């Protein structure tokens, strides 16, 4: 059984690049089930007359905020100062790491890491929950299936776990059961451990993993804690470095159906997706597009906000792919010079007092004609990549209508019809998903059975299938 509140306190020295050291007593505290805050406290142990200068050093001179390095073991990135009382500083903590810097080990007997993901209730089918006649609940891990993949760092595997916590409510002791999504990493294949370098690589890998996993679930996901475990020899000391950061909010699952059939991620399915992302020549654009797309699915956003994010996701990935696959998206300078000259001469022939102002406006817009329109780029990209969208775009005007809604929203902050906005929001989200699925080489027959229930609802004008709260500005 675990305590929900984790509190640590210790003596140490704050270290700075110019070899200044400040003796302190440090305390930090957080709730295991709340990832939005870590409380920090520092008490200065030096003579009182030095406190003023030490405050300036700790809080950051000239608005330069440095991480707090304590005993060469802890690194604390501090947030806002909450209170300052005679030698005592109370502040929020953005992130905290312990034992990661300057940690080295060769040929470890035990080398592993555990990564915590938010939100925690993905419902991965790795646990069977059974109830006994006595009222107890037992949890059994399914061994035959596992979402696992290999990298040059080690073997990763995704798990659903349950943590039990002691707590007191209304003067009664209670047991709490918290669901948790975790990624386990076996690092034993690494013979020489330089944890600082490995930690950076794991953080980068987590970013890719959360991106792909979130795309499969239509759910923004973030890594917020990494716990390591190392032991060099049997019965020798066990080292447990860790890293924890604060997120802006405790995330909950969206109301959307998953995109990918989770069963297809087992037995190497997830490996295919993560490899496709990492090897893609447009990896950065794919990730940026996915992040905007997932943000558009969040339940607490207004429909206007969601629409703009979804359209930005589409715009981003189309622009990226057009520069990658379309060679003539910009008319060559020589040819454009001739075309522009002909257009200007033609406009001059119809010039008169009444038309001059309009002709002048057209001439100022001429440079934009040199670039390929978004609609043409979109058609070229989907054709070149052989992306199937015929069941999404039933009419050629759909993209033009979606763009018109976006332009009116962005330039005029105006919405004519929220019904149309909801319809095209779903269409745009579905198009972006098809493009990314194509880039990741994931077949459409491996999608979740109900992944397109909202799309079918808007295409058939049956908006009852949207199952979405519409929040407007």
Image (tube, rainbow, N blue to C red):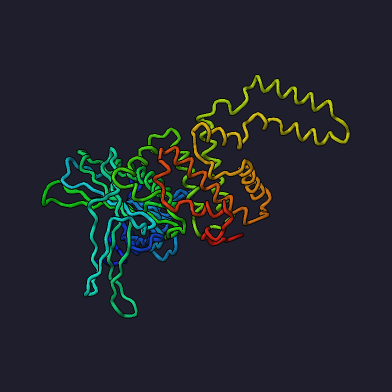
Determine the residue positioned at 27% across, 66% down.
164
Foreground pick, 356 / 343: 343
- Residue 410 pos. (x, y %): 64, 48
Residue at image coords 34%, 80%: 170
Farthest bottom residue in view: 171
Image quadrant for the C terminus?
bottom right
Which one is in front, 412 or 406?
Answer: 406
Quarter of the figure that contains the N terminus: bottom left
Identify whether 139 is placed above or below 286.
below
- The answer to whether 308 appears left or right of 112 in the picture is right
Among all residues in the image, which is located at the extreme right? 353
Front in this rendered view, residue 22 or 132: 132
Image location (x, y in percent) of residue 333? 64, 22
Q: How many marks?
A: 0
Q: Is residue 185 left or right of residue 118?
A: left
Tell me where residue 7 appears, x and y as whole percent.
30, 64
């Amino acid at each position: 059984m675990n305590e929900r509140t984790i509190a640590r306190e210790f003596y140490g020295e704050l270290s700075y690049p110019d070899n200044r050291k400040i003796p302190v007593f440090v305390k930090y505290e957080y709730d295991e089930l709340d990832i939005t805050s870590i409380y920090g406290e520092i008490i200065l142990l030096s003579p009182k007359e030095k406190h003023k200068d030490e405050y300036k050093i700790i809080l950051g001179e000239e608005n330069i905020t440095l991480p707090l390095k304590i005993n060469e073991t802890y690194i604390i990135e501090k947030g806002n100062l909450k209170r300052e009382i005679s030698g005592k500083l109370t502040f929020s903590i953005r992130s905290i790491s312990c034992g990661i810097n300057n940690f080295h080990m060769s040929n470890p007997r035990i080398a592993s890491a555990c990564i915590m993901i938010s939100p925690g209730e993905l419902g991965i089918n790795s646990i069977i929950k059974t109830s006994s006649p006595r009222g107890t609940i037992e949890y059994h891990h399914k061994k035959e299936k596992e979402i696992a993949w290999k990298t040059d760092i080690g073997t990763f595997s995704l798990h659903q776990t349950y943590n039990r916590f002691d707590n007191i409510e209304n003067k009664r002791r209670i047991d709490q059961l918290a669901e948790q999504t975790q990624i386990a990493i076996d690092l034993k294949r690494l013979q020489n451990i330089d944890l600082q370098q490995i930690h950076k690589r794991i953080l980068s890998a987590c970013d890719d993993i959360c991106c792909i996993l979130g795309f499969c679930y239509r759910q923004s996901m973030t890594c917020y804690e990494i716990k390591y475990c190392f032991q060099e020899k049997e019965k020798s000391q066990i080292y447990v470095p860790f890293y924890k950061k604060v997120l802006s909010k405790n995330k909950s699952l969206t109301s959307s159906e998953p995109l990918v059939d989770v069963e297809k991620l087992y037995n190497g399915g997830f490996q295919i997706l993560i490899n496709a992302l990492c090897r893609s020549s447009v990896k950065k654009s794919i990730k940026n597009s996915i992040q905007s797309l997932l943000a558009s699915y969040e339940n607490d956003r207004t429909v206007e906000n969601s629409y703009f994010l979804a359209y930005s996701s589409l715009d981003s990935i189309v622009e990226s792919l057009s520069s990658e696959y379309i060679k003539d998206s910009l008319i060559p300078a020589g040819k454009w010079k001739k075309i522009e000259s002909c257009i200007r001469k033609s406009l001059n022939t119809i010039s008169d007092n009444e038309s001059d102002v309009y002709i002048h406006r057209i001439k100022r817009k001429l440079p934009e004609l040199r670039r390929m329109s978004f609609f043409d780029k979109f058609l070229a990209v989907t054709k070149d990549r052989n992306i199937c969208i015929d069941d999404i775009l039933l009419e050629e005007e759909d993209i033009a209508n979606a763009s018109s809604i976006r332009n009116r929203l962005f330039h005029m902050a105006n919405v004519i019809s929220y019904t149309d906005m909801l319809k095209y929001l779903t269409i745009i989200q579905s198009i972006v998903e098809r493009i990314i699925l194509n880039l990741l080489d994931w077949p459409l027959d491996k999608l979740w059975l109900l992944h397109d229930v909202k799309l079918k609802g808007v295409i058939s004008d049956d908006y009852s299938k949207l199952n979405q709260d519409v929040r407007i500005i």
